[in-house]
């Protein structure tokens, strides 16, 4: 049960951090990406792979 709660919390954190990163990239770029959802998916996927690997090692 604790694992499920941990994955939910990690998923929420990943979502908000990925959104913040995407917004920062777009601000520096000066315009929105055409395929914003694909860029968001790439960011969240990369962060998820790294974070879950770290969690597994702990």
Image (cartoon, rainbow, N blue to C red):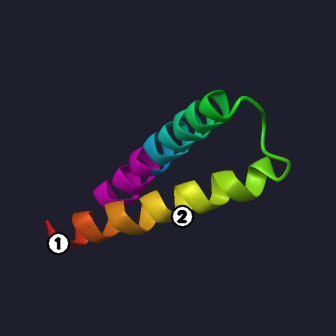
Q: Position of residue 24 (x, y in %)?
A: 56, 31
Furthest toward the left, the residue is 58
Q: Is residue 19 left or right of residue 17?
A: right
The mark found on residue 45 in the picture is 2
Q: Residues within 10 Å of mark 1 (few under 14, many from 20)?
A: few
Q: Nearer the viewer, residue 15 or 22?
A: 22
Which quadrant: the N terminus? bottom left
- At x 29% / y 71%, what residue is drawn? 53
The mark found on residue 44 in the picture is none
- At x 34% / y 52%, what residue is drawn? 6
Question: Please, what secondary structure does the residue beneath circle 1 have?
Answer: helix
Q: Does residue 58 sit above or below 31 in this rendering?
A: below
Q: Position of residue 51 (x, y in %)?
A: 33, 60
Magenta residues span: 1-10
Magenta stretch containing residue 9, yes or no?
yes
**Disc 2 and disc 1 in contact, CB within 8 angstroms:** no
Q: Is residue 23 left or right of residue 53?
A: right
If you read the primary sequence from the N terminus, does the residue marked by circle 2 or circle 1 appear first?
2
- At x 65% / y 51%, what residue is drawn? 40
Q: Position of residue 42 (x, y in %)?
A: 61, 62
Q: Nearer the viewer, residue 2 or 57?
A: 57
Q: Which residue is mark 1?
A: 57
Q: Does residue 38 sit above or below 20 in this rendering?
A: below
Q: Is residue 9 left or right of residue 36?
A: left
Question: Please, what secondary structure does the residue beneath circle 2 have?
Answer: helix
Q: Does residue 13 sit above or below 45 in this rendering?
A: above
Q: Position of residue 14 (x, y in %)?
A: 47, 47
- At x 65% / y 58%, what residue is drawn? 41
Magenta segment, principal secondary structure?
helix
């Amino acid at each position: 049960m604790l694992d499920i709660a941990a994955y939910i919390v990690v998923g929420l954190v990943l979502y908000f951090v990925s959104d913040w990163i995407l917004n920062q990239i777009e601000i520096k770029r000066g315009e929105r990406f055409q395929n914003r959802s694909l860029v968001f998916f790439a960011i969240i996927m990369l962060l998820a792979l790294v974070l879950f690997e770290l969690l597994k090692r702990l």
